[in-house]
Image (cartoon, helix red, strand yellow):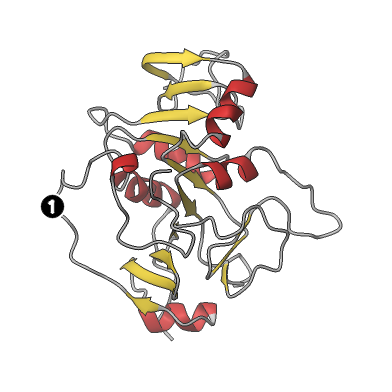
Amino acid sequence: MTDLSSGLSRRELAARIALDIPEGSVVNLGIGAPTLVADAIPDDLEVILHTENGMLAMGPAPVPGQIDPDLINAGKQPVTERPGASYFHHADSFAMMRGGHLDICVLGAFQVSERGDLANWHTGAADAIPAVGGAMDLAIGARSVWIMTDLLTRDGTPKLVAQCSYPLTGVRCVSRVYTDQAVFDVTPAGFVVRELFGSATIDALASATGLHLEDGRVAPLPTGTDRAPARFRHPTTMNEHGRGHDR
């Protein structure tokens, strides 16, 4: 079997995700690895980052010595503000999330099923500390839900599964999964591989996950194209609930 140890680092994966965010999008980045995407968004690209704790137009992490303790994201990490940034009540932030005003959210995951179910708040283990946060609101409220995660856990257990065994965060809500080995779209036919990283192959991914994977790789678009705001674009693939379309 092909070695799957040569995939992308988390910062490299964050940079890959940033490339797919269309100009003008309103985006929420979940706690943990997804926050790295903020550092990878080009300065000349207008992307409005929303934080669960009440901020629009969040910027990347501050450089050492220039930390404002009043500027933090939902994970309590220091952040910066972009021109035009605004602040508001936590309840207003959740109203934005629940009201369908976010084009994209990028979340971490314990498991994603081939029909797009997401489990990311609790493993069900007796000694595990549950962390609900706003993930359930984001999973249901955002127009497109992208997942950033490793393909396998440290013990080699796949995070892409036929059916989630952990408590669900959202049902049929995920449209795309970015892993250290490949990018997958969630479609009515299951997972479709859009891009491979490192030495990964379709057969190796199928063997590691135990799933049937469709090969949907296509030639990438030239840099700078397909940058219309997500709310005005129609996805090339979607799950059976049509996630990604304007509501």
Measured as percent of width and height from the top left, residue 141 is found at 54, 41
Q: Residue at x 57, y 36 (%)?
A: 98
Residue 83 image offset from top left, x and y in percent: 34, 14
- How crowded is the residue under tag 1: few (<14 C-alpha within 10 Å), some, or many (20+)? few
The residue lying toward the viewer, choosing from 41 and 243, is 243
213 horizontally vs 118: left or right: left
Secondary element type, mark 1? loop
Expressed as whole percent of the image width and height from the top left, the position of residue 10 reads 44, 50
Q: Residue at x 49, y 60 (%)?
A: 241
Judge left or right: residue 47 versus residue 221. Answer: right
Place residue 185 in its image quadrant: bottom left
Q: Which residue is mark 1?
A: 222
Which is more toward the observer, 191 or 245?
245
Total labels drawn: 1
Q: Residue at x 56, y 15 (%)?
A: 88
Is residue 240 visible in the rendered image? The answer is: yes
> Amino acid type of disc 1?
Pro
* Rendered-image quadrant of the N terminus: bottom left
Does residue 183 sit above or below 190 in this rendering?
above
Q: Residue furthest front?
A: 247
Q: Is residue 125 left or right of residue 118?
A: right
